[in-house]
Amino acid sequence: MFDFSTETLRFRSNLTPLVGGTITISLMLLLGVYVLKNPTDTLMVLPIFPALVVLGTTLNGAAIGWGALLLGTLPFLYRSFGDWHIGLVGGVIVLEMYIGLKGAQFLSEMVRRRHRDRVLERNALSEEINLLREAGEKEESRVQALEEKGRRFRRLGEIAGRLGESLEEQEVCRRIADDTGRLFAGKFVALFMKKRGRFLLQATAGVPLENTEPEGLAEDEFNQIVLRTGVGVTVADVRRDFRFRAEGKRGFLSLVAAPVICEGAVEGVLRVHGIKPDAFQTDDLRLVTHIAQLGSVAIQNARLFSKTEEMAMIDGLTKLAKRWYFNDRFQDECQRALRYRGKISLLITDIDKFKSLNDNYGHLFGDKVLATVAAVVKEELRAIDIAGRWGGEEFAIVLPNMDRRGACEAAERIRGKVEREVVRRVAGDKPVTVSIGVATFPDDIRRTDRLFDAADAALYKAKAEGRNRVVVSGEDPSRGKR
């Protein structure tokens, strides 16, 4: 951009040598003419020449050369034409030549400087445009990063809502893995939870790893360092990270892992794997940590619900089903047997002379006997069988798809094991036995709603016949009701 004050200064700085040189040469010219007209005064004016030389040198170095040329030209012209006027004309010509040359030099310098200034201005303008473009690109990147953060936070809110929809722990684990996989497309997600003191794979999502079994990652060093430190970890390249030992070929080269903390302890690890190095950004660990925190809350809620539900359904002392829950399950199994024309057996077990044990050895001893008998009963049951505390020292056991013979054998195993094990485990020298009544639909009873009456009548008969025995229903239940 043109600056008038700057150009004025530059014009003055270029004009000063021109004027100074012109004055110096003019003085030398006049002095030379004077010497030629008054040769007798040469010695008098001779000291003036050095002064003019110094003045010319100060104002413009070129004046020295022009002055010397003038002094040499005047005597030559004088001798040639014999007239001092010719010398004066020659000096004027020399002066005009000097002025013309210096003017041309001045104009050339002005044009050159103006061109240079314009180049500098153009370069400065280009640099300013580049800086503005870079600033715009940085601002655009910052806006995009903020938008991505906003999207991620919205997704976290959605994840929190989905995790809160389930109160079953395994389903919560599956949703944690699935939602994390959706956020990290093209990556492999694995969730490990601690079971019985060691990590086990609970859920996976995303692109599977090549040549790697997910179950084999459960006890690797990445989970262990998260377990020890309780904080997340990012590994840009597992081959170069000094924190981890070099192993054989892995199916992943980069990793983000965050702890799942429940009640102040690391209960799990949420991991995202990349097949290439440097696959994760700085904020990815923070994001995975947020998901793990949301997951830990959902898992704790599921466990609390399960525990509450268990407390409502399971008897605290015997760990068997409470009466209402057992009755619901019993009705379900009866309906299933009727629908598919199947069989169902019912065992009612009673601890012999339990009141006497309580009276003689105390209720604490009686509670231990109850818990031990219940444990023995559960040990002898199948996974599909259902055992419940029917009341006091009585237990009821449903055996789906079990005929009379199978039910009798199961009842005999329970009776024999109680007689052997309870004495050994808690009773010492105090014998503990049980009596069991068995009824089977449709072998003994044609109606499922009469199974309890039939089994109860068989139990009464077992006690009447001396206790510590198994009796199968084969008579009218009304005959043996108590």
Image (cartoon, helix red, strand yellow):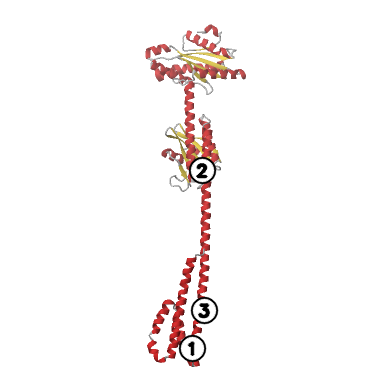
Point 47% across, 9% down: residue = 463
User: Looking at the picture, which amino acid does disc 3 mark?
Assistant: Gly
| Residue closer to the observer: 432 or 124 | 124
Q: Residues within 10 Å of mark 1 (few under 14, many from 20)?
A: many
The local secondary structure at tag 1 comes to helix
| Residue closer to the observer: 406 or 305 | 305
Q: Residues within 10 Å of mark 3 (few under 14, many from 20)?
A: few
The local secondary structure at tag 3 comes to helix
Q: CA distance from mark 2 to mark 3?
A: 73 Å
Disc 3 target residue: 100
Q: CA distance from mark 3 to mark 1?
A: 20 Å
In front: label 2 or label 3: 3
Residue 29 visible at all? yes
| Residue closer to the observer: 442 or 231 | 231
In front: label 1 or label 2: 1
Disc 2 target residue: 149
Residue 62 visible at all? no
Q: Position of residue 474 (x, y in %)?
A: 56, 10
Specify the quadrant of the image occupied by residue 354: top left
Q: Position of residue 475 (x, y in %)?
A: 56, 8
**Which label was assigned to residue 87?**
1
Residue 159 sits above or below residue 420 on the image: below
Q: Earlier in the sequence, mark 1 or mark 2?
A: 1
User: Looking at the picture, which amino acid does disc 2 mark?
Assistant: Lys
User: Looking at the picture, which amino acid does disc 1 mark?
Assistant: Gly
Q: Residues within 10 Å of mark 2 (few under 14, many from 20)?
A: some
Q: Earlier in the sequence, mark 3 or mark 1?
A: 1
The local secondary structure at tag 2 comes to helix
**Which label was assigned to residue 198?**
none
Residue 54 sits above or below residue 84 on the image: above
Q: Earlier in the sequence, mark 2 or mark 3?
A: 3
